[in-house]
Amino acid sequence: MTYIGSTIPVHIRTHGAVPPEATDYAVEKLDAALQHAPDPVVASWVTLDAAAPGDRVDAHVNISGIHVHVHAVGETLQEATDIMQERLRSRLRRIRRRHGHDTPIAF
């Protein structure tokens, strides 16, 4: 089985005091979740917001024309990132089932 990952850079937005380690962690978790994408990833964005009540992480992904958005709020940016990753994986599994992909397509 060949997985399709993010071969393009992740666009990162931050609000508030976001340490570089939190940004790196979010990109790592986003890339790990995108290993489950059923088709090639066209674009991806992640927003880390430490200025909001609770720490918030948003991910926007374009997978061959299908736009996916997930967000999560946690006590810390790491917790919010972990929740975002699980939600994104879940959404990607649903897309794969809906579009009839048993496994990711390799190009």
Image (spheres, grey):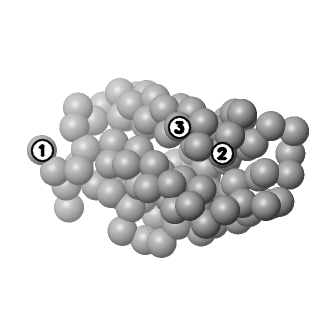
Looking at the image, residue 50 lies above or below residue 100? below
- Can you identify the residue that label 1 sits on? 1
x 43%, y 71%: residue: 8
Q: Residue 33: image x %, image y %?
A: 41, 44
Disc 1 versus disc 3: distance between alpha carbons? 25 Å
In the depicted view, which residue is nearer to us: 20 or 92?
Answer: 20
- Can you identify the residue that label 2 sits on? 77
x 30%, y 31%: residue: 100
Disc 3 versus disc 2: distance between alpha carbons? 9 Å
In the depicted view, which residue is nearer to us: 17 or 8?
Answer: 17
- Amino acid, disc 1: Met
Residue 42 horizontal side relative to residue 7, left or right = right
Can residue 49 be seen here?
Answer: yes
Point out the residue furthest to the left here: 1
Give the structural element (helix, strand or loop) at label 3.
helix
Which of the two labelled residues, at mark 1 and mark 3, occupies the earlier sequence position? 1
- Amino acid, disc 2: Leu
- Can you identify the residue that label 3 sits on? 82
Residue 7 horizontal side relative to residue 17, left or right = left
